[in-house]
Amino acid sequence: MADYEHLLVKHDGDTVRITMNRPERRNALSEPHLRELLDAFETAGRSDATGIVLGAEGKAFSAGHDFADVAARDLGSVRDLLRLCTSVMRTIQEVPQVVIAK
């Protein structure tokens, strides 16, 4: 598994554990965070794991989009960010493993 800045990923037997690790931002979804989630789920989806657990460090599972990231963008860039978010959600739905949010 790759090393990530915003995620902790562990292959634990037949389970891949993906933990969002931006507790200081309540795991708000910035572009780099979303890109890491996409890569982690694509990689986990190709693995021999039978399940994926998505968790989070800190007080909040996720505060949603990181508005500091969104506010700094023009309209076209916001659209690109939302397309990336859609890709993440579709990938989570399409991996062959059972996905559990913890």
Image (spheres, rainbow, N blue to C red):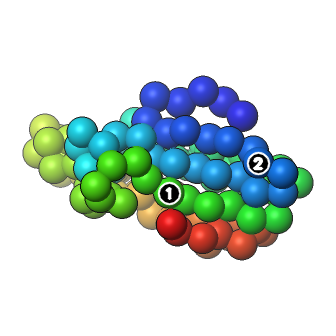
State the image quarter where residue 71 is shown: top left
The local crowd at label 2, few if under 14, some if 14 to 19, many if 20 or more residues have their Cα within 10 Å, is few
The structure residue drawn at horizontal position 41% and vertical position 41%, both measured from the top left corner, is 21
Is 37 left or right of 57, judged from the image as shown? right
Percent across and percent down for residue 77 are 26, 44
**Residue 76 seen anywhere in this rendered image of the structure:** no
The structure residue drawn at horizontal position 88% and vertical position 54%, both measured from the top left corner, is 48
Percent across and percent down for residue 75 are 17, 51
Q: Is residue 72 above or below residue 101?
A: above
The local crowd at label 1, few if under 14, some if 14 to 19, many if 20 or more residues have their Cα within 10 Å, is some
Q: Quadrant of the N terminus?
A: top right
Q: Amino acid at mark 1?
A: Gly
The structure residue drawn at horizontal position 33% and vertical position 49%, both measured from the top left corner, is 58
Judged from the image, the secondary structure of the residue bearing numbered disc 2 is strand
Q: Is residue 63 above or below residue 94?
A: above
Q: Which residue is mark 1?
A: 55
State the image quarter where residue 33 is shown: top left
Name the residue furthest right: 48
Judged from the image, the secondary structure of the residue bearing numbered disc 1 is strand
Q: Which residue is mark 2?
A: 12
